[in-house]
Image: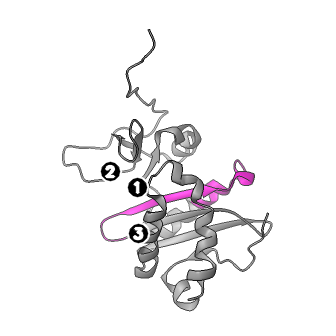
Amino acid sequence: MIGYPELPRLIDRKYLGSNPDAFQNLLPRIFDHLSELSGYYPGFDEWLDKKVLPGLMSGERSILLEYRRGDLSGLAIVKDDESEQKLCCLRVLPPYQGTGVGLKLFERSFEVLNNDSPLLSIAEEQLVVFRKIFQYYGFEFAKIYPDYYRPFKAELSFNGLIESDSNFSLLKPFTGFQLPKFRKSTHG
C-alpha cells in the first residue's frame, strides 16, 4: 500500500484555499481511488470534474478521508447546500472492507452534515453490501429509479428522493427490502 501521511482527514473549501497545490497533487490521487465506481455510474469522471470540484471550491461539498496505519483506507464525498444534505459517495478500499472503515466514514459524514439521515442512493447491486449498515442506522427506503443511470439497472434512494416527486411519501424504515424484478425472465 502507498502511504499518504500528508493527506488531511477533510478536504473542503478551507483546506483547498490553504493548499492550492492540492488540485494538481492531491485530488487526482484521491479521484483515482474512486475509479472502480465508474462501472456503476457512467459519466462518473465528468461528475467529479463538473460537480465535485466546483462544489469543493464553493463550499457545498467536502471529501472525508479515513486512514489505517498511515494508508488511505476509505473516503466519502458529502454535499451540504440549501436544497439537500447528501452522502454522495462512499468508498472503502478493498483491503479495508469489513474492518469498520465504512462505519467510521458514515459517522463522520453525519457529523459534517449535522444530519444522521442524509439522502443517499445506491446501485441495485450494492444493496447486499449496504443492507446491514442501512438497517443499523434506520435508514428509510424511499424510491426505486429504474434505468436511472444505466439501462436495465435501478438506483435506490434512501432518506429522501434523488429528484423531487410531489406524489411521494417515505415508506417504512429499511427492514431488509427485497428488490423487485424489473426484467421479464427469458427462460422457458
Could you tell which of marks 2 and 3 lies nearer the N-terminus?
3
The answer to whether residue 114 shows anywhere in this view is: no
Q: Residue at x 40, y 55 (%)?
A: 119
Callout 2 amino acid: Leu
Location of residue 67 by image quarter: bottom right
Q: Nearer the viewer, residue 98 or 146?
A: 146
Q: What are the residue bounds of the magenta stretch? A: 81-105
Q: Mark 1 sits on what residue?
A: 119
Question: Where residue 150 sits: x, y (%)?
Answer: 40, 44
Callout 1 amino acid: Leu
Could you tell which of marks 2 and 1 lies nearer the N-terminus?
1
Q: Mark 2 sits on what residue?
A: 161
Q: CA distance from mark 2 to mark 3?
A: 19 Å
Q: Mark 3 sits on what residue?
A: 51
Element marked by disc 2: loop
Q: Nearer the viewer, mark 1 or mark 3?
A: 3
Q: Quadrant of the C terminus?
A: top left
Q: Residues within 10 Å of mark 2 (few under 14, many from 20)?
A: many
Question: Where residue 88 sits: x, y (%)?
Answer: 46, 59
Q: Residues within 10 Å of mark 1 (few under 14, many from 20)?
A: many
